[in-house]
Amino acid sequence: MTKKTEPGSKKELSLKGKEEILKALEERFEKNMNRHEGLEWSEIKKKLEETPEKLWSLNEMERTGGEPDVVDYDQEKGAYIFYDCSKESPTGRRSVCYDRAALESRKKYKPETSALDLATSMGIELLTEEEYRALQKVGEFDVKTSSWIHTPEDIRELGGALFCDRRFGHVFVYHNGAESYYKARGFRGSLSV
């Protein structure tokens, strides 16, 4: 796992940090060609080198156990799409409630943070239900864990939040109180580069 960003740095990695994350991303890219058929690492690397803040976010995804990888290319925006591709929900992002309001509503046994707060600090977005289902088409993820996903505002206003997992060969979407948190539930993120 790559190291946490140095104190005082403005969401930019050291030269060594950049080299380490680029190497990890390239190795994962080469190992998992089924996730990104038709895409070339050299083009992705060039784009990453031009956007140091995105590389920093990918390092945060890596550091927290997400194993980010390219899963798509948005032709319209000219952007490569990275998702967390760890087999189970990222270990460094578990035991979090859904958002700040949920965290503040807990009277006792508060988790350290929330999924949305952590994602924002990392510069990434929670996967939507559609993105989560797309990820499951390139592999089997969350067969022992679960992951918070972006929750529509009307559900959130009523106190709920959504999460997904894969069981019995199918992807399931569930609901829970947004303030709940579990040792085996984290969140997966996405990043456009």
Image (cartoon, rainbow, N blue to C red):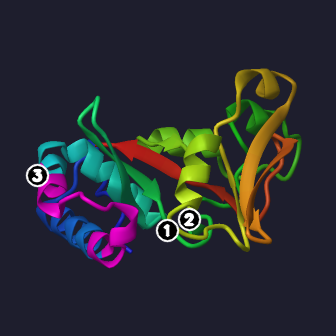
Q: Amino acid at mark 1?
A: Gly
Q: Quadrant of residue 71?
A: bottom left
Residue 17, x across and y down, in percent = 21, 65
Residue highlighted by disc 3:
46
Q: Is residue 1 visible?
A: yes
Please name which of the two marks, 1 or 3, marks the residue nearer to the observer. 3
Question: Cα distance, mark 1 to mark 2?
Answer: 6 Å
Q: Amino acid at mark 2?
A: Gly
Viewer-proximal residue, 158 or 9? 158
Residue 9, x across and y down, in percent = 25, 47
Residue highlighted by disc 1:
65
Q: Which residues make up the magenta segment?
A: 28-46
Pointer 1 with pointer 2, Cβ within 8 A: yes
In the visual, does 19 lie left or right of 34? left
Q: Is residue 2 visible?
A: no
Compare marks 3 and 2 and give the one earlier in the sequence. Answer: 3
Residue at 60% in and 39% down: 116
Residue highlighted by disc 2:
92
Residue at 74% in and 49% down: 163
Of the 4 image quadrants, the one containing the C terminus is: top left
Compare marks 1 and 2 and give the one earlier in the sequence. Answer: 1
Residue 2, x across and y down, in percent = 34, 70
The correct choice, above or below, for 112 with respect to 53 in the image is: below
Residue at 85% in and 40% down: 106
Viewer-proximal residue, 56 or 146? 146
Residue 20, x across and y down, in percent = 22, 71
Residue at 12% in and 44% down: 50
Pointer 3 with pointer 2, Cβ within 8 A: no
Compare marks 1 and 3 and give the one earlier in the sequence. Answer: 3
Disc 3, SS? helix
